[in-house]
Image (cartoon, grey):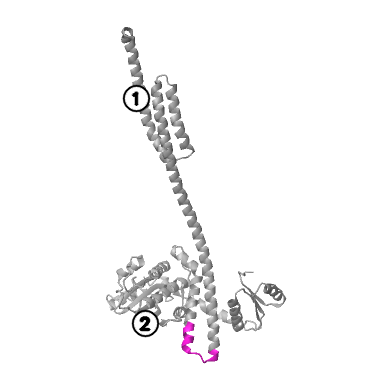
Amino acid sequence: FEVLKATNLTAADELQHYVTRTTALSTTNLQCAFSFPQLLVLAYVGFSKSTSLALILMPLVFGIVLWASPLVPNDVALSRGIVCLICTIFFAKLCARHSLLSRCSFYSERSFETALKVAVQASRKADSILNHKLKNNMADAVGDIDMFIEDVEKVGNVNPQLVVQLKQAGASLRRGMKSCRHRQVYLQLVVNNYKPSLQPVHLQKFAMELTTGRHVRLFAEDVLVLIDPVLCELIVDNLISNAFVHGHPNDPDVEFRAMLRPMLTAEENRRHNNNAPGERLFSGTSDPIVLDGNDPRSSLQRMRLTLLVSNAKNPARPEVTEDYVKDVVSGKAVKGPSTSAMSDHIGLQHSFMAADTLGMTLSLNQRAQRVTAKLEGDVIMTHAGTAVRQSAEADLQAWPENLKIYCIDDSAPARRLLFHNLTKWAATPNVRTYGQNEGEAARFIKDTVNDADIVILDQHLEY
């Protein structure tokens, strides 16, 4: 280059200009190519303080460096600056569009989540209100039915079949009231958060309450056992309802048996199997519980409870097989032409769920023309309830007569039922009810302060 400059200055200047321009073009092209992915990433990330600042500073610093550099020709700096400006505007628009779409999407998701939470909370509150109102309405209805039955039985010239039907309606209402009262238990059950609560239950009374108002043949032992009455009632009630709904359309012939059997020791189990090879004492899906003779639980106080609900098979329905039961429990059962359009098998699914929670075994099988549902589990017999009943009877005998009982309630049916039941069961004619209007509230306060023995108040008065 020095030799060329000495011999031909013009050629040397042209060569220097060419080399400088080519070098500047290559460098700026490389820098632009390196900046485009960065701008694309910024455009994809979207607008924020950091990305917006980077999107502005990158082309600005690039342009300042081009204009300040003595080695970059002016035409190259101008052309690359224009290209950088166009790309910046393009990526800025792309960034704005992407940010707008992303923010719209985020806002929609957030709004949906917020609306869903509000809807769930509102639904729970509305469900609680509906549950409370429904329970109260059923209580009023069953109370009116009971009072009507008492009145007509005193007269004695009413069709007995009408009385029977009214008693069945009252029994159904009482079962509905129990279901409303156990709402929280059902909520805990479906989220697998329920802990069984064992209570002494009179097995025969338990079975009679479940079958009252239903045409069911009942066989139940007169014993006291420790069970969870809420979940056991849920299971058996579903089984009896299914027996009527899915049984023979003309005569379902429903039967309910509640039986206790002693648990086998190891020696008794071997002797039983030797006498009857292949035969099982309990025909459910689980094996019979076998205890060692030295096990303290082998006492006869620990028994095997078996609850059986059987019905005549509906000839139009498919045969109940093990695979069919598994499909029903898993929700995969296909509805056939004879299946009710309203049937979703949720009652049976909840029954199996409740049985698992209790540590009991629930099975469903068919033999010949009978479909049998069996709930099995080990329970403990107890005599704790006897002392409680004796104490309650002693308390009732010591109950004073002619007490002054004043009640206030804004519900007319509730006032009617309070007066009827207190007059009948509290052995006193001195029962007064208040609450027909707001003015009676002041009179209620004055009367109760003066001479009332017992005061009963509605927890949620509307005035």
Q: Nearer the viewer, residue 222 or 143?
A: 143
Q: CA distance from mark 2 to mark 1?
A: 96 Å
Please say if 460 is above or below 48. below
Per the image, is 163 magenta?
yes
- Between circles 2 and 1, the one closer to the viewer is 1
Which numbered tag is attached to residue 26? 1
Residue reaching furthest to the left: 277
Displayed quadrant of residue 291: bottom left
Residue at horizontal 67%, vertical 77%?
A: 453
Please say if 27 is above or below 380. above
Q: Which residue is mark 2?
A: 253
Q: Secondary structure at mark 2?
A: loop
Highlighted range, magenta: 153-167
Per the image, is 99 magenta?
no
Count of all numbered marks drawn on residues in the image: 2
Q: Looking at the picture, how far across and down is residue 252, in whole percent?
A: 36, 81
Q: Looking at the picture, how far across and down is residue 22, in whole percent?
A: 34, 21
In the picture, measured across the screen, residue 9 lies left or right of residue 382, that is left
